[in-house]
Amino acid sequence: MRINMKSIFIVVLAIVSVSAPAKTPSSVWKSGVLKRVTKEHLSRESSQLGKKPPKHGVYINYYFIEADNSLYEGDDVKLKQNEKGFPVSVNSPVKFFVSGSDMYVQDDRGKKHRLRLVNVLPTDATQQSSASPQK
């Protein structure tokens, strides 16, 4: 009886990947302050939603975190209808990290949530430009 080694390898790989979920090391988490959470609704008629928009449009939560002289902006577009986002407190410390185009945020209960990293702005430059007089 000849067993296909490729099939065995795929089965073993699938079992290992399911049984051992990747843990995020504590060293990658940064500390910051959640400055603001805003919600936006894009209606079905909006041209931003493409050819077949959802019936009720899309709700997007934006999360703004200040850390390391930068303002990190992430959005959560997985909300259905008028769902609330995850539990976080504005103007309080928050743990987060950035991986490629994703931003992960820990909520008040310690659960990890994946957001799309939208923007990273320097906070030093915005404070200096607003403090200097216009010419």
Image: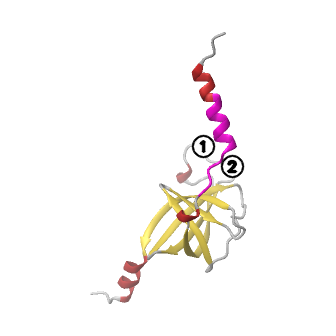
Residue 132 vs residue 102: left or right? left
Specify the label residue 55 is tagged with: 2
Residue shown at 47% from the left, 55% from the top: 100
> At which x and y percent is residue 29?
56, 66
- Please rate how many residues cluster around mark 2, counting C-alpha atoms within 10 Å: few if below 14, some from 14 to 19, many from 20: few
* Residues shaded magenta: 11-24
Instruction: Locate residue 88: give its quadrant.
Output: bottom right
Q: Secondary structure at mark 1?
A: loop
> Considering the image in quadrants, where does the N terminus appear?
top right
Q: Alpha carbon of mark 2 to alpha carbon of mark 1: how far?
A: 9 Å
Residue in front for this viewpoint, 125 or 113: 113
Residue in front for this viewpoint, 56 or 134: 134
Residue 23 within the magenta-colored segment of the rendering: yes
Amino acid type, residue under disc 2 in the picture: Lys
Specify the label residue 71 is tagged with: none
> At which x and y percent is residue 45?
60, 53
Residue shown at 33% from the left, 88% from the top: 132
Residue denoted by label 1: 52
